Image (cartoon, rainbow, N blue to C red):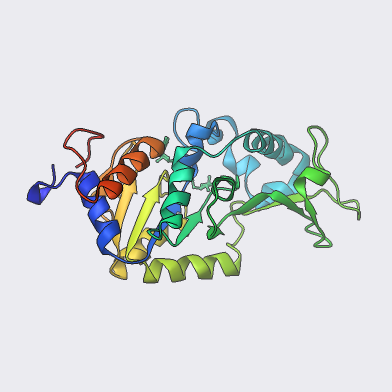
Amino acid sequence: MRPGGRDPIGEAARLLRERRGAVALTGAGISVESGIPSFRGAQGMWTKYDPMEYATLHAFVRSPRKVWEMLSEMISVCGGAAPNAAHKGLAALEEAGLLRAVITQNVDGLHQAAGSRRVIEYHGNLEELICLYCWKRYRTRERWSPGPAPRCDCGEILKPNVVLFGEPIPWLPQEQAEEEARTCGVLVVIGTSAQVSPACDIPRIAKESGAAVVEINPEPTSLTGSVADVHLRGGASEVLLRLQEALSRGGDAPATGPSGH
Ligand code: APR
């Protein structure tokens, strides 16, 4: 129970009700319940593929076929996934006028599939392939199939339009994300370990600009107890459902529920 006797879900609901312009920042954790592994943590993607060998631009240019082993697995897993209650919860908050945008580090397209309209894809999207030599672009589903790496008409191996380590964030999503962070009333940070820069700077930018930061994660992160004003400990779907219930009741959630600090 927080100072003032308000439970964390109640406090988060109060912030969303009272402050204008909430924005969400999401990471791999929000898609775990859709069957897409996160990157770090026990079953994380990076426990199977060393990111320095499979997820840097340098590695892609040096051995694109090797990197495509990992990329093909990501495309298959994401291609077979559907949005979960957390993705749908954010779309419902947007529909209700309580959320104005989602900044996502994810490349799975599940926010849009859930109905979210304003989605800033900070790390790009797996649904498009690009040639690093002639800059031609293709729909992944038109050029990719399990097997050899897809090629451009110019003969070069194509790369998904996602941001690999060592690549800069594209100018527009970076500008849009920082603008949302500078001007939002509440930033809801869901399912990110907040270890990768510059995405992990977004909560700090929001906080320094006067926003309240609400974190949803089953584990504490570097934001917990520092940048985050409220930490809602639990899985994204369960916590967002409780938050929506509290919002619809227009008051505090009952004392029981996901433990928060
Ligand atoms: N609900 C909410 N959060 C969850 C859930 C869940 N069901 N399951 C796990 N998490 C949390 C974990 O506790 C962890 O803090 O999600 C977080 C996932 O962290 P990472 O795997 O590090 O993913 P992310 O923060 O999105 O990574 C950032 O790093 O590898 C690069 O480009 C990649 O976009 C990615 C970036």
Q: Does 78 sit left or right of 236 as displayed?
A: right
Q: Does 139 sit left or right of 257 as displayed?
A: right
Position of 28 relative to 181 (above/below): above
Furthest-front residue in view? 249
Q: Does 28 sit left or right of 207 as displayed?
A: right
Which quadrant: the N terminus? Answer: top left
Q: Position of residue 249 (x, y in %)?
A: 25, 46
Q: What residue is at 78 percent from the left and 32 percent from the top?
A: 146
Q: Is residue 224 visible?
A: no
Judge by depth and name the residue closer to the eye, 185 or 69.
185
Q: What residue is at 23 percent from the left and 55 percent from the top?
A: 14
Q: How many marks?
A: 0
**Which quadrant of the frame does ligand 1 lie within?**
top left
Which quadrant: the C terminus? Answer: top left
Q: Position of residue 73 (x, y in %)?
A: 67, 33
Q: Position of residue 254 (x, y in %)?
A: 18, 38
Q: Is residue 41 visible?
A: yes
Judge by depth and name the residue closer to the eye, 76 or 5.
5
Q: Does 155 sit left or right of 256 as displayed?
A: right
Q: Tell me which corner region of the image, top left, top right, bottom left or bottom right, holds residue 243.
A: top left
Furthest-left residue in view? 4
Q: Tell me which corner region of the image, top left, top right, bottom left or bottom right, holds residue 133.
A: bottom right
Q: What residue is at 21 percent from the left and 42 percent from the top?
A: 253
Q: Position of residue 25 (x, y in %)?
A: 43, 54
